[in-house]
Image: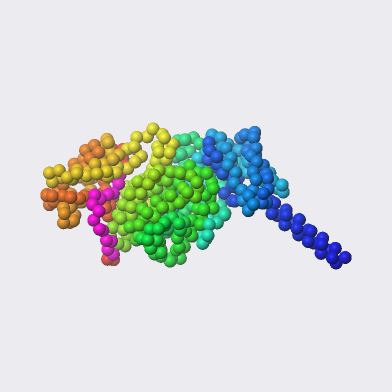
Amino acid sequence: MKKLLMLMALLALMLYSFNAAAFIRLPPIMSSNMVLQQNTKAAIWGWADPSERFIITESWKTETDAVTAMNSGKWVAKISTPPAGGPYTITIKGRANTIVLENIMIGEVWVASGQSNMEYSNNQQIKDELPTAKNNNIRFFMVAKATSEYPQETAEGQWVTCDAESLKKFSAVGYFFGKKLNKELNVPVGLIESAWSGTPVELWEPNEAFGNDPEVKEAATKVKDVTYRPNKPALIYNAMIYPISNYTIAGTIWYQGEGNTVRAKTYERMFTGMIGAWRKQFQQDFPFYYVQIAPYTYESTYEAALLMEQQTRSLSYPKTGMVVITDLVDNIKSQHPINKIDVGLRLANLALADTYKKPIPAEDYKNPLYKSMEVNKGKIILNIDNAANGFMLKGTEKQPTEFLIAGGDQNFVPATDIKLDKGRIIVSSKEVPNPVAVRFSFTNTGMSNLFNKEGLPVTPFRTDNWVVTPVKIAAN
């Protein structure tokens, strides 16, 4: 009798184990209320019994998708999505359970990532939105903060519809970006926020992204140990980017850089390395649009200027775009400018023009950008892209501000004679009869009054490549 009872208990345990293992499971990001990328092969993934065969049915079509789990139990299905619309359902029917995902929309999906200025939510601009925030065609997924030494399979979070409650917690920049896309494209928009205040770029990329560059690897070891975030490369990538990398997206928006000003020299290589690593992991060559950091009173001279320069250089990386916000700063002693609406709108204009091919003139969505220079009779002629219609000044000053000029002695003085033309700026000073270089807004707090005719601020720049060493600023 005793042996019989033991045998029955063993059989019961085996049956329980079989049934438990056979249940199909999905990661949190695969859930009701989600938005799937339109007109593509969108990924659906999860876990099941090894080699289990099951069926996926999408309500927008009559055919079903047959899926077989791998020997590891993992499975990924690529399902054909229709043009934007919804709501739809997806039914996943397996041997032991059936999962029904409801209220699914088809549209455009973007990741919003970076540090505090991307994470920032519930400011007065968001509060003004709350009475009319409810919008079934905008959905949010917030990746919960987590770290890991190794890539993780899941990230916690939940898809929710935009309303007064969900909006209070979501990225303000992300929301205003998504709202603009929703309005202009007339399609549902899904926004995946993965952000963490105070984080340097090293934490957002896998270790292999640093490559064989010894200078980059050395810089990555110098991330400070602080209480409000991790301090080792890849820890956030492993837990907050890798787990969502199967998700099919349209692109990424990014607002970060303040955490790297003390290591500005290597930022371009780190940043573009991160973009490449993300695209490789997502297996998508998606566009990557980012915000240049705002002017701020850093502890050392030129910290912000050097980081901004690195961000501008990153524009040479394929399928990237940058918005400049030197005109959106209300307080240079705060790293968090209040105006998040215009940041989101400028990012959205980049996407509308470059990704969605809306007929927007370059001058309307791309900041004026230094291209080249020539010296002629004691004057430096600067050739500027995205200013074909000329320039304008804002404020009370009658001359453009923030221009410095220098000769071979590398001694910069304010330019005294500045002429504006279509696509050109001519700079000179009686103090510098033989000029060789110009700097524009190349400081931590430079906020020039110079814009193109369409109202976008000129991107800070310098024409020289002389060594600039930040020096600690003495406290007042």
Q: Position of residue 147 (x, y in %)?
A: 51, 60
Up/down of 360 relative to 2, above or below: above
Q: Position of residue 4 (x, y in %)?
A: 85, 63
Lateral position of residue 443 relative to residue 251, left or right: left
Q: Residue 245: tell me if it is visible.
A: yes
Query: Which residue is pictured at 41% across the width and 34% down the height?
Result: 358
Colour mapping used in the image = rainbow
Q: Quadrant of the C terminus?
A: bottom left
Up/down of 175 relative to 218, above or below: above
Image quarter for residue 225?
bottom left
Query: Which residue is pictured at 33% across the width and 52% down the height?
Result: 310
Query: Which residue is pictured at 43% across the width and 50% down the height?
Result: 275
Residue lying farthest to the right in this orientation = 1
Q: How many marks?
A: 0
Lateral position of residue 423 relative to residue 320, left or right: left
Q: Position of residue 431 (x, y in %)?
A: 12, 52
Predominant secondary structure, magenta span? loop
Residue 255 sits inside the magenta stretch: no
Q: Quadrant of the N terminus?
A: bottom right
Viewer-proximal residue among 303 and 160: 303
Lateral position of residue 412 relative to residue 75, left or right: left
What range is drawn magenta here?
457-473
Query: Which residue is pictured at 58% across the width and 42% down the height?
Result: 78
Q: Residue 197: tell me if it is visible.
A: no
Q: Position of residue 226 (x, y in %)?
A: 43, 65
Viewer-proximal residue among 436 and 124: 436
